Amino acid sequence: MDEQTVFLPRAEADRLLEALRGAGFGRILGPVAREGTLLFQPLRRWDDLPAGVRDVQQPGRYRLQEQDTPRCFAWANGPQALKPLTFRPREPIWRAQRSADGQLSFQSTQEDPEPTALIGLRACDLAALDLQERHFMHGRFPDPWFRRRREALFLVGMSCAHPAQTCFCASTGDGPAISRGHDLGMAELDEGYLLWAGTQAGKTLLERLDLDAATAAQRRTVEKETHQAAMGQRRTLPGRHLKQGLYERLQAGHWKDVGERCLSCGNCTAVCPTCFCHMEMDEPALGGDSSEHLRQWSSCFNAEHSFMGHFVVRSDTRLRYRQWLTHKLGSWHEQYGRSGCVGCGRCITWCPVGIDITAEAHALLKEAPDA
Amino acid sequence: MKPRVSVHKFSSCDGCQLAFINAGPALLELAGLVDIVHFAEAGPMDPDAPVDIAFVEGSISTQEEAVRIRRVRESARYLISIGACATAGGLQALRNFNAQGVDDWTRAIYARPEFIESLDKASAISDQVKVDLELWGCPVNAQQVFTAIRRLLFGALPFVDNEKVCQACKRQGIVCVLVTRGTPCLGPVTRTGCGAICPAFGRDCYGCFGPAENPNTAPLSRRFQGLGLMPEDIARRFHFINSQAPGFLEEGRNWDQGTP
Ligand code: SF4
Ligand code: SF4
Ligand code: SF4
């Protein structure tokens, strides 16, 4: 938010969708209340958004409730946001064909993704995308499937005034205000929306909209609500750099404790917006003359993840949970320059048995370091 | 010479054989790649012919079957058991919990019980003979069966995924019914392979693909109790289609007399 921040009255909100379409984004996705949660779905009009809906999240539990507010973003998040759009859950990465004379030919599966605008991304979602970019787009060989889809996106962030009980983005430093990674930033008030640009593309869009400046009072209200949203968060991680603390406790008794409760089901890694592990496999057609090479989301909670030649390195859940936590909160620092957790709380809510990464991290660090 | 394949039926509902028959064009394509020498439900009858791959549906439930499965094993280079009956005894293995055996049941149900020939316990094929590959499910997923055949035809070992249903759920963007509705879903301990059909239709997984790799059933049962299930209901979740499968058998026993 800055001096250039403009105001879009609630009654005119459809103009934003029109402007996005006018800028070439034929596909606009936003949160829609469906199947008891909030899912990113195509938006035709502003009315498709979940006005008056609130999420109630707890470890292992998610419910939507009605509340008396005109606001469409008075909730924290749903199970997924950007990840499945850029890093597909399952996709062919090449196809092979064998001709009658035995020659093999390979075909690329890279699509031309449709330009897509996303409305209602949270600060944690944008921070997570930045981390996924560090993984998929670094070095000399950026992942072409990821990159093409990423480059086709226009990101509209929405400052968060309604964190769930499971959120802790203030503790990781990734939210709740929209401060980076957005093309366009937004914040919601009862009477409408404040908008500000984060990139040149966002600026061009705002020029198209030609709106009045937001008042200083409106900006102050947003600042106050965002501040309250941060202060209202009860969960924390025991620090921003936990690598050493965790590495010094690889033999801690608490790993066994959590290993007994954890189902090694991998829901946490699937909903985590920064987790990127996948497996690759070939699916030959029955006739044997063609084959697809696929990659799909996998998890450090699977046996396959640590299968080496003929044995599974992390054969029990204690070791798998330790891998997840020491990587996410520890060795990510070496790989990507920061922790892999953006505080979205999804792994807590969508864990069938409600295992809470913040509680586990605190419990582990309370133990004495390994001898 | 084309590889020779047979499909054998033991005690079962025939639903897994239907996975072949319903495959339509894929079955015709398969018939071009292999010689199907025995498949009673589809026509060919030659149960003792030597084969490269024998598919076995059904559990061992009678004396005759206990003998016949040995002949199948001897005639096959590679034996694949398909479906919950063959891999874990199936629904009919619920009788295994009756310590008195089946006689009082057959007397109570049938007018002429002397015509009923039944072992006291229904067992998985792997309890009787060596099995080279198990494809779980009630019924099996036809795609999984055809992929396994294709890999064997290439001379490669079939890869059978043993991760949890939850991961298939999440990959397909299905919203978790346990978390959003509090239904007692067995997905977190159940082997993937069905494509998460039940959660896709808003209901809880009831474990028809059997236990996944490394299933941690105890905390899930405690969660079910927290959702309001009575101990005997928890026991029945595990003692159902795959009641005899290691993991499910013990967990059901832990709850059938009350909270452990
Ligand atoms: S570890 Fe959990 S809270 Fe952190 S980013 Fe991943 S899902 Fe969100
Ligand atoms: S922490 Fe929860 S979601 Fe993650 S693997 Fe364990 S039981 Fe599953
Ligand atoms: S619906 Fe069942 S299978 Fe799907 S994620 Fe939830 S617990 Fe797992």
Image (spheres, coloured by chain):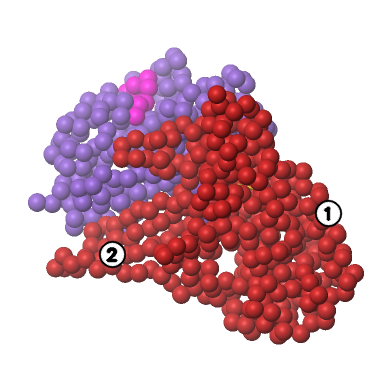
**Which residue does the numbered mark 2 point to in the structure image?**
A96
Residue at (29, 60) in percent of width and height = A291
Q: Can you identify the residue that label 1 sits on?
A: A228
Task: Give the camera-side residue of A188 and A67.
Answer: A188
Tell me, for residue A151, which label it has, or none: none
Neighbours of disc 2 within 10 Å: few (<14), some (14-19), many (20+)? some
Give amino acid for label 2: Ala
Residue at coordinates 32% horizontally, 48% vertically from top-left?
B145
Residue A188 in the figure: left or right of residue A255: right
Please give left or right for residue A90 compared with residue A197 in the image.
left
- Residue A88's place in the image compared with B110, above or below, is below
Label 1 near ligand 1 (CB < 8 Å): no
Q: Earlier in the sequence, mark 2 or mark 1?
A: 2
Q: Position of residue A85 (x, y in %)?
A: 54, 63
Mark 1 nearby-residue class (10 Å; few <14, some 14–19, many ≥20): some
Q: Nearer the viewer, residue A113 or B255?
A: A113
Distance between the alpha carbons at the discs numbered 2 and 1:
55 Å
Residue at the right extreme of this rendering: A217
Query: What is the drawing colour of chain A?
Result: red
Is A203 located above or below residue B158 in the figure? below
Residue B132 visible: yes
- What colour denotes chain B? purple
Q: Secondary structure at mark 1?
A: helix
Position of the C terminus of chain A by quadrant: top right
- In the image, the segment drawn in magenta is B117-124
Question: x, y percentage for residue A30?
Answer: 66, 67
Q: Is residue A49 left or right of residue A126?
A: right
Q: Residue at x 35, y 49 (%)?
A: B144
